[in-house]
Amino acid sequence: MIDQQLGKLIFKLNGWKYEVNPEALSDAKQVIIGFPHTTNLDTVRAAIFFHILKLNYHILVKKELFKFPLAPILNRLGFIPVDRAKSQNVVQQMADIFAKSERFSLVIAPEATRGKNGEKRPIRTGFWHIAKASGVPIVLMLWDDAVETGRIFAKIMPSESMENDLKEIQRLYAAYGTQIELPQKTI
């Protein structure tokens, strides 16, 4: 829908830049996570960013957005609805899609819904389970509002320890000034 040049123009007109570590996107398949997720416009910005990068991307979004007139547009853009109240089988469904696809980038904003009064809650860990079950790396993306820059800066391969992997993700984001609240119990 949006070609690469149009995406670059949209970023430029909005004062945004982007930086990509090519090593972070060297695989044909990956789960991409993005922080911080503060507004639904982050999803629009991400879609434009991925068009610039010519990625075959799919974004998991809450099913509540899939209503007329948005549903046909979201489907065409490769968005995948998720019922957050009934998320069972999502890991296996995504693993099956990864297995059938030659190239596939699944994008997830793992920040949980903010609580009342804006307090942050721990991140959800479904992205890790999907990447682990699919045998694909987790690519780290950041929206740096302070300098209006989108970044894809690192990747990790899920290990046998979700807790260690989450701590490493937390450390990598902290290097860019982004704090991530981890779940108290990760296993």
Image (spheres, helix red, strand yellow):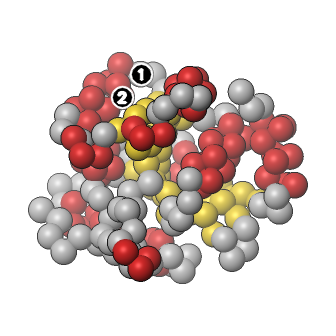
Q: Along the line of sight, which residue is nearer the eye, 141 or 120?
A: 120
Residue at 86% from the left image edge and 46% from the top image edge: 9
Question: Please, is residue 91 above or below residue 18 in the view?
Answer: above
Which residue position holds label 2? 98
Question: Please, is residue 144 above or below residue 62 in the view?
Answer: below
Where disc 1 sits, the SS reads loop
Residue 81 x, y percent position in the rendering: 40, 34
Where is the N terminus found, in terms of image quarters? top right
* Neighbours of disc 2 within 10 Å: few (<14), some (14-19), many (20+): many
Disc 2 marks a residue whose amino acid type is Phe
Residue 42 x, y percent position in the rendering: 59, 55
Residue 89 x, y percent position in the rendering: 20, 34
Q: Residue furthest front?
A: 68
Disc 1 marks a residue whose amino acid type is Ser
Q: Along the line of sight, which residue is nearer the eye, 121 or 160?
A: 121
Visible in this render: residue 133? Answer: no
Residue at 39% from the left image edge and 38% from the top image edge: 63
Q: Residue furthest left?
A: 187
**Cα distance between the residues tagged 2 and 1:** 5 Å
Q: Along the line of sight, which residue is nearer the eye, 77 or 26?
A: 77
Question: Please, is residue 80 above or below residue 21 in the view?
Answer: above
Which residue position holds label 1? 101
State if disc 1 and disc 2 touch (CB < 8 Å). Answer: yes
Residue at 54% from the left image edge and 80% from the top image edge: 177
Where disc 2 sits, the SS reads helix
The quarter of the displayed image where residue 143 is located: bottom right
Residue 88 x, y percent position in the rendering: 18, 39
Visible in this render: residue 75? Answer: yes
Residue at 44% from the left image edge and 77% from the top image edge: 118
Where is the C terminus found, in terms of image quarters? bottom left
Horizontally, is 184 left or right of 151 in the view? left
In the picture, the disc for residue 179 is none
